[in-house]
Image (cartoon, grey):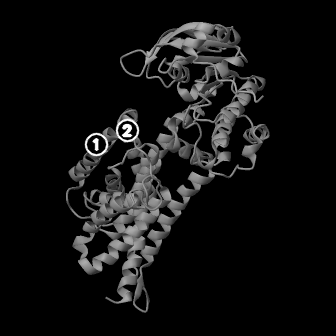
Amino acid sequence: MSLLTLSGVAGGYGDVDIVTGINMHVDAREIVTIAGTNGAGKSTLIKAVMGYLPRLSGRIEFDGHDLRSLSTEKRAGIGISYVPQVRNIFSTLTVLENLQVVEKVADSRKRIAEMFDMFPALASRRRTQAGNLSGGERQQLAFARALMSSPRLILLDEPSAALSPALTELVFAEVRKLPATGAAVLMVEQRARQALAFSDRGYILDSGKIVLTDTGSALLANEKMAELYLGSKPVEPVQAS
Amino acid sequence: MDWINITNAAINGIVLGLLLALPALAVTLVFGIARFPHAAVGDYMTFGAYTAILVQSFMSASLVAAALIASAATAFLSLFFYAWVFRSLSQRSPVSSLIASIGVAFAVRSVITFFAGQSQYVIEAPLVRAWNFSGVRILPTDLYVAATAVLALAAVFFMLHFTAFGRRMRAVADNPELAAASGIRVREVMITLSVIVGAFCGLGGMLMGFKAVVLPELGWELILPIFASVILGGIGSPVGAVCGMILFGISQEIASLYVGASYKLVLAFVVLLLVLLIRPQGMFGKIIAVR
């Protein structure tokens, strides 16, 4: 049985549906990437799972729970974490407070120590106001905050947004480690080629509908689809002769 | 104008500023967390002052009992209006909540006027002689008022910065969506906020009853100076609200020596306009972009 299952999900913010007829699943400890063109409804889908969508139909199940009957905070309580694309930390709180504020943590002190072991750059800045961190440190803090509750599913909304290529690599390296913590990952990513390269599976979204699903490597191998939905291949650096 | 008069006016201003810092802190907390300017805060103060008078008239002459019951009753009133009005407006524009809070203010004042009329009341306090230091006078009652306000303010600052619940409140103020995604029960935070707002306004109203006669318009006439001070300190900044209110109290009392007491309120508008023009973010606020 899948960890997360979406059946016939449709919804949006106003009268018009942004996503329609969505059927998808995420299994335990796998990385699943949602890719597609701009405005395809990728982030809307993630928000639907976290409970931010004001209008929604269909069925969303997580580990036997009907998510539609649960508030966002209750969804967090049953093991779903969310890292938004922007404003993914509490910038007026310190690094330590960002971790302390997470609810439903059995032994908060121990877990915070584990987070500082996992992200050593944060340990030395525990008393720093989070708004003063660098881009990379902020992303690490966002991950640490999301991992505090030992979630079984982490929703990542464009984790590489506004990051340099070098920082993107670092962030993706962190994402690759997440299944080892016991969490499955459902990720929306603009840099889809890079993300699918390490994803177990992927879904391609177009105009609010799933148009293709396959393993990450198979989606990348489908040249025509990849060209249409994943953009051009990154230019290979020229070797000096 | 000699320095003794100015010092006495400054002392009055500090006391007034400290006691009005209670509702000012309530305004800034509501603005920071629930994101609307709460215009009923002044009338919650009036309700607190009348509750204290009721307690003194029918139950106990004890000022402590009057303060506790006034705070508790106003906390209940604030909670009632949160549950009845503001909770259902929380997903709408802040303007809806602002207009609703003006409606709540009118409703509270009208009910008070209906039952108490326009008669003037006073909160009974023991008559004490002012301490005189070469012309500089300090009333012991003023010291009690200031000390009570300082204790209440210190309790809230301690709660905000040194307790888990305070962290949750600051997290909701910073980013309510992320707070919910972190498992924080936002509604629980809002309920506690309503209780704090009511308790502070009730206490502030009761303390104000020492300094002024109690009328149904007591709090409503203070709402503009309170808003002006919150803007002066920096909207959403608790420290700013307290410092802004004290500074405002001192400047208002000193200015009244020169322009007369009737024009004190004019100063509230002048300060408000000047701050908005010169430093829109206030003393402790940060510039925020509005989308």
Residue B7: x and y in percent read 40, 83
Q: Secondary structure at mark 2?
A: helix
Counting every numbered tag in the picture gives 2
Q: Are marks 1 and 2 on the same chain?
A: yes
| Front in this rendered view, residue A136 or B179 | A136
Q: Chain of mark 2?
A: B
- The three-letter code of the residue at mark 2 reads Phe
Residue B167: x and y in percent read 59, 46
Residue A67: x and y in percent read 56, 18
Q: Residues within 10 Å of mark 2 (few under 14, many from 20)?
A: many
| Front in this rendered view, residue A79 or B281 | B281
Q: Which residue is mark 1?
A: B99
Which numbered disc, 1 or 2, marks the residue that appears first in the sequence?
2
Gap between marks 1 and 2 measured at Cα: 11 Å
Task: Reply above or below: B132 against B95.
Answer: below
Q: Which residue is mark 2?
A: B86
Task: Reply above or below: A58 against B42.
Answer: above
In which quadrant of the rendered view does residue B145 lie? bottom left
| Front in this rendered view, residue A134 or A104 | A134
Residue B30: x and y in percent read 43, 47
